[in-house]
């Protein structure tokens, strides 16, 4: 199901502050810059992180604690609205000193260094609403 016709808007290239929480940093930037429709990509390194895996039967997240430094081999996500405020949804692939990876939904991570490209879109308003079938907050689009 397509949610509408979106057009490229502003691009933001970001160096994330050392020691900040990656998700909080992106959320605060989105609030400041009024970013409500966007996707982003990033690489870098985290000092520690919390990943999640969604239990599709129980409709709840299981947390995976990453307590040692890892590379952000890949981080991808999006920004939309939830309860009227910018909401960041991110997934990450994190690799250790041997190149072994852990991956999943990103709940948070303390940044050692990170570089992001955030690409905004003009188009319908993307708002997250609770979906009974999955238990997740999924997108609904309404005209802006
Ligand atoms: Zn997720």
Image (spheres, rainbow, N blue to C red):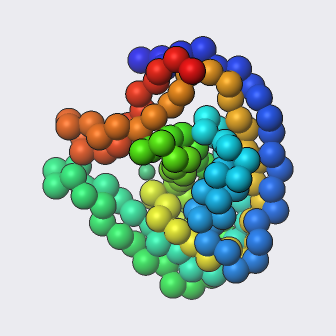
Which residue is found at the position 24% from the left and 40% from the top?
134
Which residue is found at the position 24% from the left and 45% from the top?
135
In the image, taking residue 117 as reference, residue 87 lies left or right, namely left
Establish if 69 lies above or below 71: below
Which residue is found at the position 65% from the left and 59% from the top?
28
Residue 114: x and y, percent?
75, 65
Q: Residue furthest bottom?
A: 68
Q: Residue furthest top?
A: 5
Establish if 120 lies above or below 69: above
Residue 55: x and y, percent?
25, 55
Looking at the rendered image, the quarter that the C terminus falls into is top right
In the image, taking residue 63 as reference, residue 93 lies left or right, namely right
For residue 26, say whether it is visible.
no
For residue 7, say whether it is visible.
yes
Q: Is 105 or 100 nearer to us in this picture?
A: 105
Residue 109: x and y, percent?
57, 72
Looking at the rendered image, the quarter that the N terminus falls into is top left
Q: Residue furthest left?
A: 57
In the image, taking residue 62 as reference, residue 98 lies left or right, namely right
In the image, taking residue 142 as reference, residue 132 lies left or right, namely left
Establish if 23 lies above or below 119: below
Which residue is found at the position 64% from the left and 52% from the top?
31
Establish if 33 lies above or below 100: above
Image mark count: 0
Residue 117: x and y, percent?
76, 47
């Amino acid at each position: 199901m397509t949610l509408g016709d979106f057009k490229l808007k502003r691009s933001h290239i970001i160096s994330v502050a050392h020691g900040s929480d990656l998700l909080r940093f992106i959320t605060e930037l989105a609030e400041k810059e009024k970013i409500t429709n966007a996707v982003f990509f990033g690489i870098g390194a985290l000092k520690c992180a919390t990943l999640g895996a969604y239990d599709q039967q129980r409709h709840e997240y299981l947390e995976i604690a990453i307590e040692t430094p890892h590379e952000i081999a890949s981080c991808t996500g999006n920004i939309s609205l939830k309860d009227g405020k910018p909401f960041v949804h991110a997934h990450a692939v994190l690799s250790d000193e041997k190149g072994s990876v852990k991956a999943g939904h990103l709940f948070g991570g303390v940044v050692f260094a990170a570089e992001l490209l955030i690409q905004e879109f003009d188009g319908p308003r993307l708002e997250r609403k609770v979906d009974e079938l999955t238990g997740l907050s999924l997108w609904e689009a309404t005209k802006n």
